[in-house]
Image (cartoon, grey):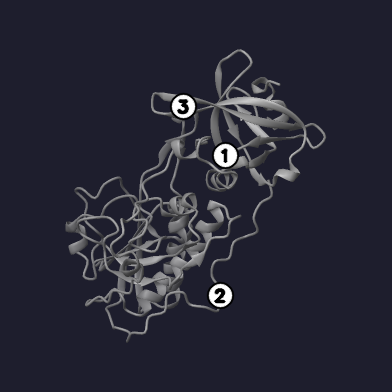
Amino acid sequence: MTFAPRLRLASPRKRYFSSEIERKACDPLRILFCGSDAFSCASLRALHREHEVNRGLVESLDVMVLPPRRTGRGFKEIKEVPCKSVAEHLGLRIHQRETFRGWSMPEGTNLIVVVSFGLFVPPRILKSAKYGGLNVHPSLLPHLRGPAPIHHAMMRGDEYTGVSLQTLDPKAFDHGTVLAQTPSPGLPIPGSATLQHVTEALAKVGAEMLVQGLRDGLHVPPYRDAGWMAEKLHGEDLVHAPKVGKRESQIDWLEWKSSDFERHVNIFDTIWTHAKNDRGKFKRVLFLDAESVPVDEVAGREEEAVFRVEDGSEGRDVPRTVRVDDERDVVYVQTTREGWVRVRSVKVDGKTAQKARNGLREFLRG
C-alpha cells in the first residue's frame, strides 16, 4: 500500500480560528495541564513555549497525567502516556494520578487546561480555579462529542473536520461554551490520509488555537459562543464519538465498499476477519494493507474464500471471489457492489506476516 504524504490541514499564513473581539485582560495564568496521548502533547509544548517567552500570560505550568497501563500480549508491558515523557523533557512538575479524589491542585492554580485526558474534572476542582477550565477538542462541536472524534470522522467518511476550544462543563464531557472553532466548512480530510496524519495536523491547529485563545482572553468571563456548527445541526440528531476498539476494525463483508477497506486500514493500520480454511475451521486473518482498485486492474486465477461476519454470538458466512496474481504476488478480493481491493500482505493467527498469496492459500478453493 502506498503511504499518503504528510498531511497539511492548515496553511501557516492563515488563522483558522479568528475572533473579532476585544482582548480581555487577566491575571498571569498558573495552569494545570491535563493530558495523555500524542494529540495532547502539541498543546503542552505550545503552552510551554508561551511560558518561556511570555510569563505575563503563562506564569507557571504543572502537568497531570494518568498512571502507566499494561499493554501487549499477556499485559506484561508497562506503557507510560506520551504526555509524561514530554513533560519530563520540558522539566515540568508532574502529578500522576488515576483520580482527582482526595487531591488538591497546586496552590495558586487559576486555570485548568484539559486536552485528550480521559478523566472528568469534578466541580470541586473546577470551581477552585479562578478561570475554570478549557478543553481542546478535535471536532466541530457539538458534532462528534466523545473520546474518539477523529476515528469516527474518518470512519464516517466525513469530508471535513476541525477543532473547537471550549470551556469545561461541570456536569458533562464536551458540553461547554465553544470559545473558538475552525471556520466553516472546516478542514478537508484527504481520502488518502491516515489517522496519524490527521491527528498530527489537528493537534497543531488545536495548539495554536489554545494559545491564541489565551492571548485573546477567551477564558475570561463573560464567554462569547463562537461555535457555528451547533446552528447548522439544529434539529438534527447529534452523532457521538465513543471509544473504538477491536470491533470497529473488523471487516463487514456485507456493507463495506472497497473504499471502506482502504479507509479502515488508514485508521487502524490493520483490519481483520475470520476465514474458513481447507479443514473447515475458521481462523483469524489480519489484512495488513488493502487498496481500492478499479476492476480493469484485477488479474490472476479465480478462487473463492469464505469469510465470517460476526456480531456477538451470531455469525454469518460470506463467500467472496478472490483473484490470485502470481506474477505481481498480490491477491484481489471482491467487496460489495462489484468493488475490489488489492491485498499485498496478511497475518494469520499463530503465524508471522506473509505475502497475501501465501498467507491466504489455506483459505482458497477453486
Please tell me whether mark 1 sits on a helix, a strand or a loop: helix
* 271 versus 91 height, above or below: above
Q: CA distance from mark 3 to mark 2?
A: 45 Å
Q: Please name the residue that numbered disc 1 is placed on.
A: 336
* 249 versus 212 height, above or below: above
Q: Amino acid at mark 2?
A: Pro
Question: Could you tell me which quadrant the C terminus lies in?
Answer: top right
Q: Nearer the viewer, mark 2 or mark 1?
A: 1
Where residue 294 appears, as percent x and y from the top left, is 69, 47
Q: Please name the residue that numbered disc 2 is placed on.
A: 12
Question: Could you tell me which quadrant the N terminus lies in?
Answer: top right
- Residue at horizontal 53 percent and vertical 52 percent from the top: 195
Q: Amino acid at mark 1?
A: Thr
Where residue 39 appears, as percent x and y from the top left, is 46, 57
Front one among 194 and 228: 228
Q: Is residue 64 left or right of residue 310?
A: left
* Mark positioned earlier in the residue sequence (3 or 2): 2
Front one among 293 and 105: 293
Q: Is residue 242 visible?
A: yes
- Residue at horizontal 57 percent and vertical 60 percent from the top: 190
Q: Please name the residue that numbered disc 3 is placed on.
A: 74
Front one among 316 and 326: 316
* Mark positioned earlier in the residue sequence (1 or 3): 3
Q: CA distance from mark 1 to mark 3?
A: 37 Å
Q: Residues within 10 Å of mark 1 (few under 14, many from 20)?
A: some
